[in-house]
Image: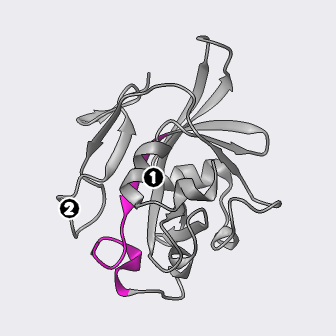
Amino acid sequence: MDRDFFERPSPEVAIDLVGAIIVRSGQQFRIIEVEAYGAFDDPASHACRGPTSRCWPMFESGGTIYVYLSYGIHRCLNFVTGPKGEGGAVLIRSIVELRSATGDDTVYEELTLGPGRVGRRLGVDLEWSGSDLFSDDAHLRVFERSDEIRVASSTRIGISKATEIEWRFYDSSFLRLGGRVSR
């Protein structure tokens, strides 16, 4: 992936992040659920009122990491989208660890559901917020998916505004709209 991948509208980036691989400390995780958030035109987004001390990273260039604290305890990982100053991001909601990936014999282990649990599993720190995915000392790396998957969509979860927008995207082989199931 390069910066151009992230410098697109958040829903486009979100769809393409489903199935992408996060590498952190030698471990590989497949992204299986995300949510897209816009900027000024998305009342559910942290960026809807412009840059603040909390959400300023959302206004950096696509490929910047944005981490926020939810309920005072959960560190939620987001990747900023769009050009600098726009304010979009994609929240990583669920991942699954890849133990081995050789041909058709991919072994998945430890399905991690929910953005708070994703943050804990990846060891996300609030100090990551504002850091660049493309710097030499990046905390993690993201690689495009290498196989075809079926991406499904639904409304976003846990918000009270813009609840009708279908910007939650997921790998339907892992998750179903009516409930979460593992493969």
**Tally of numbered discs:** 2
- At which x and y percent is residue 13? 45, 52
Disc 1: which residue: 13
Residues 65 and 107: in front is: 65
Residue type at the position of mark 2: Thr
Please report the residue visible at 73 percent of the width from the left and 37 percent of the height from the top: 27
Q: Is residue 124 magenta?
A: no
Label placed on residue 123: none
Quadrant housing the C terminus: top left
Kindly state the secondary structure of the residue where label 1 is placed.
helix
Q: Quadrant of residue 41?
A: bottom left
Please report the residue visible at 53 percent of the width from the left and 50 percent of the height from the top: 117
Residues 125 and 23: in front is: 23
Callout in the foreground (1, 2): 1
Residue type at the position of mark 1: Val
Please, is residue 8 above or below residue 182 in the view?
below
Tell me, what colour scheme is on the image? one colour
- At which x and y percent is residue 12? 39, 52
Q: Answer few, some or many: residues within 10 Å of disc 1's Cα (few below 14, many 20 plus, some between 14 and 19).
A: many
Q: Provide the residue span drawn in magenta.
A: 32-49
Q: Answer few, some or many: residues within 10 Å of disc 2's Cα (few below 14, many 20 plus, some between 14 and 19).
A: some
Label placed on residue 163: 2
Residue found farthest to the left = 164
Kindly state the secondary structure of the residue where label 2 is placed.
loop
- At which x and y percent is residue 152? 30, 36
Residues 107 and 181: in front is: 107
Please report the residue visible at 36 percent of the width from the left and 68 percent of the height from the top: 38
Work out how far the residue at label 1 is from the one at label 2, CA to CA, in angstroms: 20 Å
Please report the residue visible at 54 percent of the width from the left and 53 percent of the height from the top: 5
Q: Is residue 44 magenta?
A: yes
- At which x and y percent is residue 73? 54, 67
Q: Is residue 74 left or right of residue 139?
A: left
